[in-house]
Image (cartoon, rainbow, N blue to C red):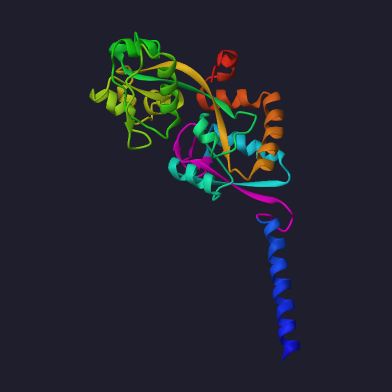
Amino acid sequence: MMLKKTATLVLGLTLLLTACGKESVEGQNDDGITNVKVAFEIGSKPMTYLDENGQPAGYDIDVMKRVDEKLEAYSFEFVGTTSDDLLIGVEQGKFQAGVKNAFYTEERAKKYIYPKQFIGLSSAGLALKAEYEHIQSLADFATEGFTLAPIAANNAQYTVIAEHNHKNPDNPVKLEAGEEFGVDVVQWVNEGRVDGGVMIQGVFDKQVSDPNGPYHHLQGDVVYKEFAVIKTWPLFHKKQQALADAYDQALEDIAAAGELEELSQKHYGRNLFEVLDRVER
């Protein structure tokens, strides 16, 4: 009986040690390649979206695919989801990384790893009725006393406006925190519910300028006025420093080869890197 118990104990210890050994290489396949789940927001064309064939597409996706090609020790799997699920999933480790045209915020830096290399640039602006196209800046918008479409407090666009207000306490933009991550800005502006709303130029172009856009019929009635070009970043889970470092090495080579500029032109119809020397954020 004692011999049987000893054998059982040894077997249990062996299984435990084996399990611990497997945990150290969790996520690796039989070839020793680490599998990485990269979440992306499915409804943020042209940055991240599903194309007509249901495949991951967009500027951020194309950049991360190039990173994947350069990293022989990693294999990326792109998982489409919502913005909120992406943020929660990367924070909790459901996804090892996420891309969503993300801006930098101090609050997010406490939850995620921001790599050293930013992934791209994004034009941020105001969607306005054509009669207000004399507005050229946030300061102009604030001076007029105009109302802004609500922005969820966890949306980095909220942080951008809050930072502007902090720097301009005598002329702040009226900023309201919304309950949803984002509202339909073009519709709100067109209906007169607000005087303007913060939008990314790529999104505005796909909704309004594109002949196939849902609001193309409003072209000329609703206009876009850029107020800043902002760096965008991928987000990595806090325990994925090695992955973030590998991304940095790959991205540096990709940027040096001019590929980011080509992808910016491809997806945005504009090489945003031409104004990089004037980017403040």
Is 8 on the left-hand or right-hand side of 105? right
30, above or below 167, in the image: below
Q: Is residue 204 magenta?
A: no
Q: Residue furthest left?
A: 192
Q: Is residue 49 magenta?
A: yes
56, above or below 209, in the image: below
Is 151 on the left-hand or right-hand side of 89? left
* Residue 112 position within the rendered picture, expressed as x and y whole percent measured from the top left: 56, 39
**Is residue 194 visible from the viewing direction of this image?**
yes
* Residue 241 position within the rendered picture, expressed as x and y whole percent measured from the top left: 66, 41
* Residue 134 position within the rendered picture, expressed as x and y whole percent measured from the top left: 34, 8
For the point 46% across and 26% down, the residue is 202
* Residue 160 position within the rendered picture, expressed as x and y whole percent measured from the top left: 45, 23
**Is residue 184 visible from the viewing direction of this image?**
no
Q: Residue furthest bottom?
A: 1
174, above or below 156, in the image: above
Q: In which quadrant will I find the N terminus? A: bottom right
**Closer-to-camera residue (125/11):** 11
Q: Quadrant of residue 142?
A: top left
For the point 59% across and 15% down, the residue is 274
**Closer-to-camera residue (45/27):** 27
Is 121 on the left-hand or right-hand side of 208? right
Q: Residue furthest top?
A: 134
Which stretch appears magenta?
27-56
Disc tally is 0
251, above or below 243, in the image: above
Is 112 on the left-hand or right-hand side of 184? right
